[in-house]
Image: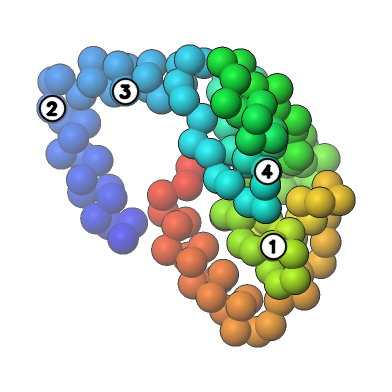
Amino acid sequence: MKAENERSAKVLESDPRFPKLQAEALKVAESPDRLPDPEFRNGTIYNTWQDEVHVRGILRRTTLSDYLKPHPAWKTVLDYDALAKKDHEKWVQSGIVGLYPGDKSVWRSGESSRLGFDLKRSRSTKPAASSAMSSMMHEREARQTELIPR
């Protein structure tokens, strides 16, 4: 996949229109006015947000009723930039995965490690997933590795 990405990047970046199109796309993608991509979990709205302050991103949440307001009040659950600085690890979100019971964990992965995060208690957890779940997560992360800038 890496070789294909490099080959595609070479073609795209050699196009004289690329710098302008890239700048326009980044302006839209990084706009503070863009719509959050919500994930509804057990009556709470979660969203991963990146901006100029949160380069790696934050996981945040709000209530459904607040989300429906023009300017929802978001509460930061997990700050990947602060966590990376504290742990000296390049953390990125690999997705929210509901672990039974209670659909409560988000997996986060770094360069060389993986941890869980309890959404209800807002604290790190050691993954208690079965080996099948761990294998599934590892395969999923391997597929995403090329797509996530670190």
Q: How is the image coloured?
A: rainbow
SS at mark 4?
A: strand
Of circles 4 and 2, the one toward us is 4
Disc 2 secondary structure class: loop
Residue farthest to the front? 65
Q: Does label 1 or label 4 sit earlier along the sequence?
A: 4
Q: Residue at x 57, y 54 (%)?
A: 95
The residue at the point 67 percent across, 43 percent down is: 44
Of mark 2 and mark 1, the one earlier in the sequence is: 2
User: Residue at 45% of width from left, 21% of height from top?
Assistant: 34
Given residues 40 and 56, the one toward you in this image is: 40
Name which of mark 4 and mark 2 comes first in the sequence.
2
Q: Position of residue 77 (x, y in %)?
A: 76, 39
Residue 105, position in %: x, y? 72, 59
Location of the N terminus by quadrant is bottom left
Q: Amino acid at mark 3?
A: Ala
Looking at marks 3 and 2 on the same chain, the residue that comes earlier in the sequence is marked by: 2
What is the three-letter code of the residue carrying label 2?
Asp
Three-letter residue code for mark 1: Asp
Residues tagged 3 and 4 counted as in contact (Cβ below 8 A): no
Q: Earlier in the sequence, mark 3 or mark 4?
A: 3
Determine which residue is flagged by label 2.
15
Q: Which residue is mark 3?
A: 25
In the image, what residue type sits under mark 4? Thr
Query: Is residue 59 at all visible to an observer of this figure?
Result: no
| Residue, disc 1 | 103
Marks 2 and 1, how far apart at CA = 46 Å
